[in-house]
């Protein structure tokens, strides 16, 4: 229950508990009926959120630490292993733009696979960002300590195998930034292909488990530099797009079937963007990622799509 305490206490809405941790945590900006509310307090015991009316030029976006466990793999398709590598110039803007990236790709594809199936998602909101309207600038953040949430849902994921990652001429940190930078436009394109709201999908990056039923070690964290583990150079990550509702709502199989189109449109989104090092329209704000994140994201896509 969401209670407006600006004047006389008044109930303005209701929200389920898992969503409350994301949308009405303390210091969040809650939007309801065209009105902005600042969350003053979230009472877990009473299941009540207390808010006050405000007029600000930003909204809040929760930062979640997510761990994914593959329960059952419904289908998997595998790309062939790499052949001979070559260099290709990748336009960073429209075809007539002058700037370009040079990225390493293969004449076929690097060993990789994509799958869909049932997963268990454990997530915890660990912080939030303040995002400015219209420009999507990150103008602030904060840390939170909230209960962990767990659900059984469905997911589509891409496995980046070691040969692909080892072929990239980037540092470990830049490779990880490239993966985070790739996941951002993957989610954007997926929501367009599915014609759904961005909040209907969740994302995560984790190390590939040997078999279904084992947990995928998470590398998603509040800060990019915290996400790089000592063994990050040797892991094979999974990039997950999962249904953000218990039981799933039927998005994973359509994404699996549209894999090639998803890769193609994601690459177009990144390469046609005129920014140099990343922006909210492609791989995410440049300040949140390593300087070569956009170039690394394109190189990963080249390895997947060539």
Image: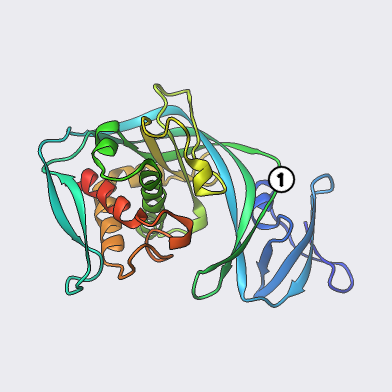
Residue that numbered label 1 is attached to: 145
Viewed as shown, does residue 249 lie left or right of 93?
A: right
Residue drawn at x 40%, y 60% as measured from the top left: 195
Viewed as shown, does residue 114 lie left or right of 117?
A: left
Viewed as shown, does residue 42 lie left or right of 23?
A: right
Residue 266 percent across, percent down from the top left: 30, 56
Q: Is residue 53 shown above or below 254?
A: below
Q: Name the outermost residue toward the right.
A: 8
Instruction: Tell me the quadrant of the picture where the N terminus can be found.
Output: bottom right
Q: Is residue 152 shown above or below 86?
A: above
**What colour scheme has been applied to the protein in the rendered image?**
rainbow
Residue drawn at x 34%, y 43% as measured from the top left: 171
Q: How many marks?
A: 1
Residue nearer the viewer, 171 or 85: 171
Residue drawn at x 25%, y 65% as measured from the top left: 92
Residue 244 percent across, percent down from the top left: 53, 47
Badge 1 density bin: few <14, some 14–19, many ≥20, Cα 10 Å:
few
């Amino acid at each position: 229950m969401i209670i407006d305490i600006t004047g006389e206490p008044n109930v303005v809405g209701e929200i389920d508990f898992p969503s409350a941790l994301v949308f009405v945590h303390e210091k969040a900006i809650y939007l309801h009926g065209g009105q902005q509310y600042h969350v003053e307090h979230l009472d877990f015991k009473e299941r009540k959120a207390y808010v006050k009316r405000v007029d600000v030029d930003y909204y809040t976006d929760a930062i979640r630490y997510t761990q994914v466990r593959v329960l059952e793999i419904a289908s998997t398709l595998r790309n062939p292993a790499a052949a001979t590598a070559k260099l290709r110039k990748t336009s960073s803007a429209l075809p007539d733009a002058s700037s370009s990236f040079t990225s390493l790709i293969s004449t076929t594809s690097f060993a990789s696979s994509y799958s869909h199936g049932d997963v268990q998602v454990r997530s915890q909101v660990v912080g939030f960002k303040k995002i400015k309207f219209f420009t999507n600038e990150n103008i602030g953040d904060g840390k939170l300590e909230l209960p962990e949430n767990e659900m059984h849902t469905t997911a589509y994921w891409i496995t980046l195998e070691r040969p692909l990652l080892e072929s990239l001429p980037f540092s470990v940190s830049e490779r990880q930034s490239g993966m985070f930078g790739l996941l951002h436009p993957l989610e954007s394109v997926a929501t367009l292909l599915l014609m759904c709201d961005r909040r209907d999908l969740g994302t995560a990056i984790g190390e590939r488990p040997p078999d279904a039923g084992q947990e995928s070690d998470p590398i998603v964290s509040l800060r990019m530099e915290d996400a790089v583990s000592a063994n990050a150079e040797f892991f094979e990550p999974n990039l997950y797009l999962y249904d953000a509702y218990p039981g799933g709502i039927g998005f994973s199989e359509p994404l699996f079937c549209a894999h090639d189109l998803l890769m193609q449109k994601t690459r177009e989104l990144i390469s046609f963007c005129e920014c140099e090092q990343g922006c909210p329209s492609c791989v995410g704000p440049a300040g949140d990622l390593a300087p070569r994140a956009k170039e690394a994201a394109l190189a990963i896509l080249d390895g997947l799509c060539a």
